[in-house]
Amino acid sequence: MELTDLTIHEMIQQLRGGEVSSVALTQACLDRIDATDTHINAFITVCRDEALAAARQADERLAQANRDKEDPPLLTGIPLALKDLFVTAEIRTTCASKMLADFTPPYDGAVVSKLKEQGAVIVGKLNMDEFAMGSTGENSAFGKIHNPWNLNHVTGGSSGGSAACVAARQVPASLGTDSGGSIRQPASHCGVVGLKPTYGRVSRSGVVAFASSLDQVGPLARNVRDCAIMLQAIAGYDPADSTSVDTPVPDYLAGLEEGVAGKKIGLPREYFIPGLDPEVKQAVENVVEVYRTLGAEAVEVSLPHTKYAVSCYYLVATAEASSNMARYDGVRFGTRVDPGKGLTEMYTASRSHGFGAEVKRRIMLGTFALSAGYYDAYYLKAQKVRTLIRQDFITAFNQVDYILTPVAPTPAFALGEKTTDPLLMYLSDLFTLSANLAGICGLSLPCGKSTAGLPIGVQLLGKPFDEAGLLSAAYACEQTGEWHKAKPEL
Amino acid sequence: MREKVTREEVMQVASLARLEFSPAELDLLTNQLDTILERVEQLNELDTSAVEPTSHAVPLENVFRDDEVRDSIGVEQALRNAPVQAQDCFVVPKVIE
């Protein structure tokens, strides 16, 4: 057993029992990153000195708490890593884009402050699809991310580095963001637990925006309990984010072992489609059996507008993205390329040089959907279809407590397999993006492995703000198997 | 019936988005946008005449706060990432001749 094999829960116990120091844990993570990240490329920036300094502080805090017979803050001394779109004071924040390659924010975002207040040690910033636009982890100006289970396969995205670093045991947990599956899908492909909380549950202040009505911050961890600990640390209302919701944060650990006896789990018939990989289908059906054994009732439900979700999503998300991306103009921060021909030419040259192909494609689609003459036909239409998709879930959740689906139609595909056809890539998100359109919470749980050795995940969806229920349902299933203990050979 | 996206339309949208593309990129984008728009055309199968649009999944209310003076990051910090700055200002190419 190496220190990097410990879960957060185990680290907390050992730190408080004085069996290990935060400096030792942090150094073990840094060593593990040194040993493995040349193959995986999960990190864009490793904050070696800052992390060790924070670890020394954490050790002092632990010693002080011990002397005072008090409990130190929840995450004191725990090494963690962040997707590189959380702004961090004095640590560059690139969004995996050439546009922000040299951008050093002047402040910490809300969740970063919360993690630090809780005593966490930030060891680095994680690779991702540029500005969170992509589903493979390949669209990064800092190089592709490789799946720790098979280095020739993608991690999924956009929080690819956030999933890969946890799977490779470089850190015990990370934060990502999920606008259409960007936490759940890479979590599934890398065999870790990923939680997308309800829209409004976690502050987005200091998170570089992609699609503002869809983006939500969430944790990726090796097991459900660690995910619950992470959510506990970051959830809550923030006056600096007017879309965060002022509703009490429950104790996510208190009800974790409640089980699923008597609960109803909905299986949407529209998600079990012919294109579904047979091994994924089998793994997900096995989970349904597990829940039946645990005393839950599985019933078929219908989400009739599912087949419109991809179209709806890619209009809403790109429209919002094109608007959010307007701020990168080479004036206040970011790359400037000035051909010396005037202001408009400077904007155009800076943006054309700074953004990668997928970001440009989405800005173009979004600008098209919002432009005069097309607004009603595309953007407004998509917003109306969004209402129908949301109503599907409201209706379904009147009948069931949770909804169970595959996370992705297939295990992680090979690097390069889908980069030439954007539509094919967009379609791989079809099971995850409805949750963002509807604003509900969702979780990806490891539940199997393909014959090729790649992880398979199952998705559980919950009612708005029922993260506690969702976590307890996931925990019940997790405890019946060993998938969360699997470790890739690197 | 939707008309195919033309290269000229793509150039017009690129100009609105302040992006420029090479001729080869323009051809590729024209094809890709046309394929994507053909796909999203399926939304017209749905009658949404009586449906309200959703802009946020969570009902939002305007949030008011007291107009209090608070600390801000200051000029130096605000300018530290500026590509070009002078005299505590962001510098941009000349706009008026």
Image: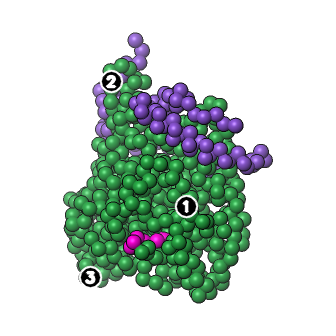
Where is A267 relative to A437, above or below? below
**Both marks 3 and 1 on one chain:** yes
| Residue labelled with disc 1 | A432
Q: CA distance from mark 3 to mark 1?
A: 35 Å
Chain letter corresponding to the colour green:
A
Secondary element at tag 1: loop
Q: Circle 2 marks a residue in which chain?
A: A
Q: Which quarter of the picture shows residue A333?
A: top left
Give yes or no for residue A119 being in the magenta stretch: no
The chosen color scheme is by chain
Mark 3 element type = loop
Q: Residue at x 46, y 71 (%)?
A: A456
Report the chain shown in purple: B
Q: Earlier in the sequence, mark 2 or mark 1?
A: 2
Bounds of the magenta span?
A452-458
Q: Which residue is mark 2?
A: A339
The answer to whether tags 2 and 1 share a subunit is yes
Q: CA distance from mark 3 to mark 2?
A: 57 Å
Which label belongs to residue A1?
3
Which amino acid is tagged 1? Answer: Thr
**Outermost residue, top side:** B97
The x and y percentages for residue A411 are 45, 66
Label drawn at residue B45: none
Q: Quadrant of the C terminus of chain A?
A: bottom left
In the image, A103: left or right of A360?
left
